[in-house]
Image: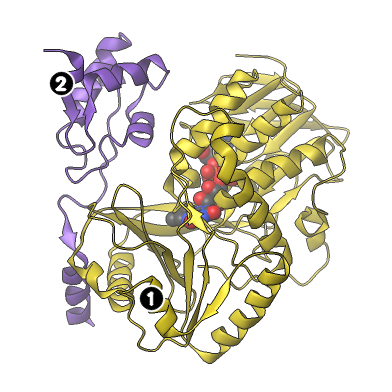
Amino acid sequence: MRTRADYVIVGGGISGAAIAYNLAKKGETDIVVIEKSYMTAGATGRCGAGVRQQWGTKMNCTIAKMAIEFFENAEEILDYDGDIEFKQRGYLVVASNKDEDEQFAKNVALQNSLGIPTKHLTPKQAQDIVPHLNTENMTSATFCATDGHLNPFTMTDAYYKAARRLGVKIHTGTSVEDIVVENGRVQAVVTDKGTIKTDVVINAAGGYAKQIGDMAGVDIPVFSQNREILVTEPVEPFQNPMVISFSKNIYCQQVPHGAFIMGRGDDREPGLSTESTWRFLDEMAKTAVGLLPPLGELRVIRQWGGLYNMSPDRQPIISGTDEVQGFYMACGFSGHGFMFAPMTGLLLSELILGEETTVPMDELALSRFDGKDLEAYETSVV
Amino acid sequence: MKNEDIVICRCSDVTLADLYELFEQGYDNFEELKRIARVGMGPCQGNTCAKMIQWEIAKYFDRPLEACAIKNIRPFTMGVKLQAIKEAAEDED
Ligand SMILES: Cc1cc2nc3c(=O)[nH]c(=O)nc-3n(C[C@H](O)[C@H](O)[C@H](O)COP(=O)(O)OP(=O)(O)OC[C@H]3O[C@@H](n4cnc5c(N)ncnc54)[C@H](O)[C@@H]3O)c2cc1C
């Protein structure tokens, strides 16, 4: 193993991949990625891989829109020989009460002002898009045709292959155990396979981001929560868009090879468990069959869990810190870090290299929480 | 029989030739192969292919069989309809 590197990235998920690629593309190629398990072992390999621009904050909308523009061209940009399976079949977001409907009217106005082509629909219009949708107790819906989903494994693989070609080194099966800080500066990363001297360490450890922060003495106000998800047997295509509802607590899509993937966000004790529970299964079955009745005929073949890393305002933390020079982080994605990854990589590489950033990053900085009341303001979260 | 004609994973239609191609690209463990080629993700959940893939990994990379981990066992053992789960849950309520 290497004993020195210009940059050490902790975590082999989509964030670590996108950061490594972006730094390397800017000419910084002396990079080591440390992954304790295998690539995409964390949330990235467990996620729904949906990408949507229908958010309630300007920052989230802006980042998502730019990320989608990247995904549209990702295979060419990354010169990938595989298939990232990017399908833009839209997201249908269902409102089931008046408050939600009013919030959605505001969201659509915001999204349209940013060039996102979302439409506010009646239940009937929603049913034209998803004929098997149960419109009982439904107030309205919003639909954005350019939202979609990807294959999380091949998308991450595409980034890593491109990064490797630029010289990035990846060590899987290697765990970061400590970060040496002296005189307020990062000095080295200690792993179970040896120590790597470095000036810059980047925390892309997903559900374990807080623990990595603690190693460097940086207090990151995030916590992790188990989110469960299931997949059915593959069937003939019959549902184009992802269907989601915040109030009913469901997201559900049919992926290109025919399986349905669905999940929900039951409020759990913070922790690092990714267990599968029968409670999830029960609630998921009731919600899915209620909203999309024909799905009752589908057989569930697998269920699993993964970690959401939650920030106080449900926006990511893509930042350095004055406390420790050379310590950077990309975490707190609050359940939408897959779709933001192209921007995570771009913005963090710009920040690290002292370039002007593509979008202002104050709202993503760790320092935004200093002495503030930490209140959630992105409400469009499952 | 040619490697292209030997089907290792029936659910996701992966042949021995496909597997060798992935080995050459550096995918050397079940978890990564599963994610890139969908082996073990179909209706049989790896009950048909996992042992064969473990064997092929051991042979190709010259490792002891015990050193080649296979899949995590996750629920379900067999497919169950969402409707049946819903009805059972409502009976309990
Ligand atoms: C069920 C579920 C559904 C989701 N659906 C969506 C969706 O539809 N759209 C979307 O955009 N997002 C979704 N998300 C969120 C998304 O998965 C995450 O935000 C994103 O994958 C985070 O990527 P990451 O690279 O930052 O973290 P991760 O993918 O978690 O990667 C972190 C890596 O760090 C490694 N690591 C941890 N500690 C150490 C250590 N000490 N040493 C070395 N390595 C270490 C881990 O093994 C892991 O591989 C979902 C998440 C879940 C759980």
Residue at (59% x, 26% y) in the render: A162
Q: Is residue B91 left or right of residue A220?
A: left
The chain holding disc 1 is: A
**Mark 1 Cβ and ligand 1 under 8 Å apart:** no
Choose top left, top right, bottom left or bottom right for residue B15. top left
Percent x, y for residue A239?
Answer: 33, 63
Using the image, determine if residue A130 lies above or below residue B14.
below
Label 1 residue SS: helix
Choose top left, top right, bottom left or bottom right for residue A286. bottom left
Circle 2 or circle 1, nearest the eye? 1
Q: CA distance from mark 2 to mark 1?
A: 45 Å
Percent x, y for residue A120?
Answer: 55, 79
Hue of chain B?
purple
Output the letter for the chain in yellow: A
Whether residue A178 is visible, yes or no, is no
**Mark 2 Cβ and ligand 1 under 8 Å apart:** no
**Towards the viewer: A139 or A302:** A139
To the question of a shared chain for discs 2 and 1, the answer is no
Q: How is the image coloured?
A: by chain
* Label 1 sits on residue: A128
* Label 2 sits on residue: B6
Percent x, y for residue A317?
Answer: 71, 53
Residue at (27% x, 15% y) in the render: B58
Using the image, determine if residue A21 lies above or below residue A212.
above
Q: Amino acid at mark 2?
A: Ile
Q: Residues within 10 Å of mark 2 (few under 14, many from 20)?
A: some
Q: Amino acid at mark 1?
A: Asp
Tag 2 and tag 1, C-beta contact below 8 Å: no
Residue at (60% x, 87% y) in the render: A102
